[in-house]
Amino acid sequence: MLGDLVKPHRRTLVFAGLLTLAGSAGGLAMPLFVRSVIDRFGAGESVLGPVLLLSVVVLLGASISALGQFVLERMGEGIVLSARVRLVDRVLRLRVPEVDRLKPGDLLSRVTSDTTLLRTVITDGLVGAVGSAVLFVGAAVLMGVMDWVLLVVTLGVVAGVGGLGSLLLPRIRAASLRAQEALGDMGSALDRALQAFRTVKASGAEAREIAVIEAAATKARDRGVRSSAYQSIAGTTAWLSVQLAFLVVLAVGGARVASGAMTIATLIAFLLYLFFLVAPLGQMVQAATQLQNGLAALTRIREIDALPVEPAATQGQTTGVPVGVVFDDVVFRYGDDRPTVHHGVSFEAPAGRLSALVGPSGAGKSTVFGLVERFYEPGSGRISVGGTDIADWHLPDLRAAVGYVEQDAPVLDGTLRENLTFAAPDVTEEEIRRALARTRLDDLVDRLPEGLETEVGHRGILLSGGERQRVAIARALLRRPRLLLLDEATSQLDAVNELRLREVIAEVARETTVLVIAHRLSTVTGADRIIVMEAGRVRASGTHDELIAEDDLYRELAATQFLVNS
Ligand SMILES: Nc1ncnc2c1ncn2[C@@H]1O[C@H](COP(=O)(O)OP(=O)(O)OP(=O)(O)O)[C@@H](O)[C@H]1O
């Protein structure tokens, strides 16, 4: 995948490599000039010319190197941008079960922290690797031209020590991967505490949550330290190999000078080149270790890349007549290691009517909605919407036809207008006005200082529970759904809000099919059909009066909610 990311930029890479090569030429020429200066000294000639020339060459070389560096860094930023864009695109198209499993905090850390690590790797690692490889090869070639025997000796020593150091690379990668995983855990822990911020405070659990996050952070530190330890050992081997090579070259070269196989000026120039190798070699080791970190980050990014995603969704309003839903012997569980939630659920919510799902908590009512929206796939049985199996619907069309009002947090951070037009950005002012009137929100908008442009706060916190719910209904309605799924909030609404909700549901049911999960029977006693669920099965269905007469559980629910005398 690193290859995939770099591939579109290979021309830039070659261009930057050439610039670096040209830039390094100045530096590389220095020992040769030194040799000629020493030779001139020996011959008693003036050295002013070579020194001036050298100054110009070095200055020019430095400018070209800087340009090459910039080109590479810019390419690195470009690569990181495409990695981020691609990752975000994947994350938002993931299927619901994957996101249930992965935890938002960990996903967040992959998009932010792992791509940032990738950036360091590409800008430092790749940039360093290209520059230093050019310098290294250049120096080696010139050394070979001067004295190939000494070059072989040098490379032998460097390769021997470097080879030992490279044994550490897999350990660096493993340690880095674990450090990034710990960061992901820290993200998840922080996310958990922030999601339930009020509960954390009300429970006086701040210290405990801080301790959990701190533990994850400490783990990340420990693993980071371990990776650093390996990295510093690997870094030292580069330095050590050059020192050793220096001693060996001094001994072998000294012998060759003594035997007349080379001049002393050449030996000095050669030794200078040797020190030229220190910087690129160190940088190459640094790049190799960085690359291990980058590969760890890539592993985590690639995990997301490998997950299945959904087809691109469509936005905007739908057209078409109201459609009904039929569940036929649906069996479902949330995962292979989870208990069965639906044990053969069958019911029908007829088109154009108001139907309600009622039953004790945990009966599997909200799961029905998750299945209709195809957030999850049933194990067996058939679900059809508008007479067509939902598996045969094009998923974006299905989602466009079905309006869904979630139970929790159905409002997003942003203005009221953004929330209303979230699913259908092109609606007209007139349509917004009508939707507000139908959801009894027109008073609210009139009261708000900035009307539709008022910010509703994180999760719509500046609105009351009833208002949030009606905003969510208005949003769903603006898309003109052919079927509206409404998961009524469990929180107790006050009498005024409850009455409004009842009016709104009755009004919406006049224009489309409505299936509502009701926690308060009072909101649905007038429904055309009430479906009573218990422990993953449908035990009865009918009108309020029929169920009062026939179903014990319904009668009990009604009795506890003071709707009839038991
Ligand atoms: N995303 C999920 N992953 C795993 N299990 C889940 C998930 N959502 C719900 N469940 C489990 O499925 C069962 C049925 O949940 P569901 O939300 O459908 O019930 P419900 O009838 O809507 O309850 P309530 O009235 O309390 O909202 C519960 O035992 C719940 O723990």
Image: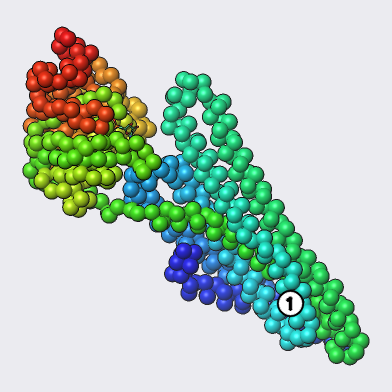
Between 382 and 2, which is closer to the camera in this rendering? Answer: 382
Vertical order, 561 against 461 (above or below): above
Q: Is residue 58 left or right of residue 564?
A: right
Vertical order, 494 against 13 (above or below): above
Way the structure is coloured = rainbow
Between 112 and 371, which is closer to the camera in this rendering? Answer: 371
Between 74 and 407, which is closer to the camera in this rendering? Answer: 407
> Dot 1, crowdedness within 10 Å: few (<14), some or many (≥20)?
some
Q: Is residue 310 left or right of residue 164?
A: left
Residue at 78% from the left image edge and 79% from the top image edge: 153
Residue at 48% from the left image edge and 74% from the top image edge: 11
x and y percentages locating residue 431 in the rendered image: 14, 38
x and y percentages locating residue 418 in the rendered image: 28, 39
Q: Quadrant of ligand 1?
A: top left
Amino acid on which disc 1 is placed: Leu
x and y percentages locating residue 536 in the rendered image: 25, 32
Vertical order, 456 against 547 (above or below): below
Residue at 69% from the left image edge and 82% from the top image edge: 141
Quadrant in the picture for residue 479: top left
Vertical order, 357 against 376 (above or below): above
Q: Is residue 277 left or right of residue 206?
A: right
Secondary structure of the residue carrying tag 1 is helix
Between 292 and 414, which is closer to the camera in this rendering? Answer: 292
Residue 365 visible in the picture:
yes
Quadrant in the picture for residue 349: top left
Residue at 19% from the left image edge and 13% from the top image edge: 559
Residue, disc 1: 155
Residue 429 visible in the picture:
no
Q: In the orientation shown, which residue stands out farthest toward the top? A: 565
